[in-house]
Image (cartoon, helix red, strand yellow):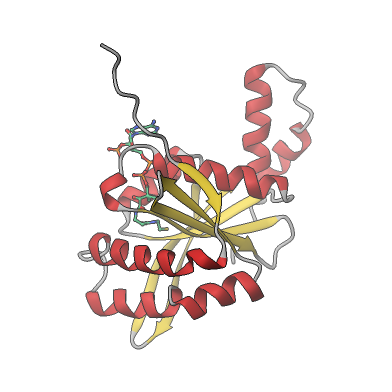
Amino acid sequence: MVSEVEQQPIIISAEAEHLEEISTLAGDIWREYFPGMISSEQIECMLSQGYTLEVLSHEILAQGISYDLMLLGSELIGFASYGPTQASGEMKLHKLYIAPEFHGKGYGSKLLKHVESTVSKRGCKTLVLTVNKNNRRAIDSYERNGFTVCDSVVVDIGSGFVMDDYVMAKNLDLAEACVCLRIGWIPCRLTTLEESDDRNCLT
Ligand SMILES: CC(C)(COP(=O)(O)OP(=O)(O)OC[C@H]1O[C@@H](n2cnc3c(N)ncnc32)[C@H](O)[C@@H]1OP(=O)(O)O)[C@@H](O)C(=O)NCCC(=O)NCCS
């Protein structure tokens, strides 16, 4: 008997027509995943600050932020957003979200690798992100994918709420150099390897 092959997700770039679906999925994920980590009042505050259609379109049209979508069949099951920072050669992963029923299947890592490859092609050497200090699952996933904690920040987001986050960073040049070394290419990026301590990760 032929075993059923599990359908694999695909990743596409978001278009204007997807924004409503992104906003809805973000609300579903935040209201299911974050209670216990932050209050429901803060969840609603962060959704209204970061996930309305107006905010999403402004990010894409005015701030140079890109959204990539993960689809399983025609179902949106996750998304990531990323864009430039003020530091040369650096980009920030703003959002990485997978619907909770699809956690633990490696889909977050797959989407993250896709983002890394995309930003590398755009000249990004360092990818930075912030993550809630209590979001152990996400921190573990980022560490498995080669990110390290390099700072911590407390950001006042108004209405009496703060984001108490770690800053994490990954040197994409270093990752590329490691791949070169592993498969036996000439390690032409070793000079960059030596410079890699200077992560310049603050945003
Ligand atoms: C952070 C987040 C994106 C991680 O997504 P994920 O798909 O669960 O994470 P990973 O890709 O690292 O999956 C790894 C898990 O899948 C398992 N796995 C199964 N098949 C796998 C495969 N083919 N490849 C890799 N891992 C696989 C691993 O064993 C691991 O299991 P574990 O978590 O029990 O140790 C997800 O938890 C999420 O969306 N959280 C809510 C939003 C959030 O917090 N975002 C981050 C804000 S900064």
Tell me if I can see residue 201 in this picture. no
Q: Position of residue 67 (x, y in %)?
A: 55, 59
Rendering quarter of residue 43: bottom left
How many circles with numbers are drawn on the protein? Answer: 0
**Which part of the image, by quadrant, shows the N terminus?**
top left
Q: Is residue 7 above or below residue 46?
A: above
Image position of 124 (left or right of 80): right
Which of these two is toward me, 24 or 146? 24
Q: Position of residue 62 (x, y in %)?
A: 65, 76
Tell me if I can see residue 118 in this picture. yes
Q: Is residue 166 above or below residue 175?
A: below
Q: Position of residue 33 (x, y in %)?
A: 26, 59
* Quarter of image, ligand 1: top left
Rendering quarter of residue 164: bottom left
Image position of 10 (left or right of 91): left
**Residue at the spot x=22%, y=66% of the render?**
35
Rendering quarter of residue 135: bottom left
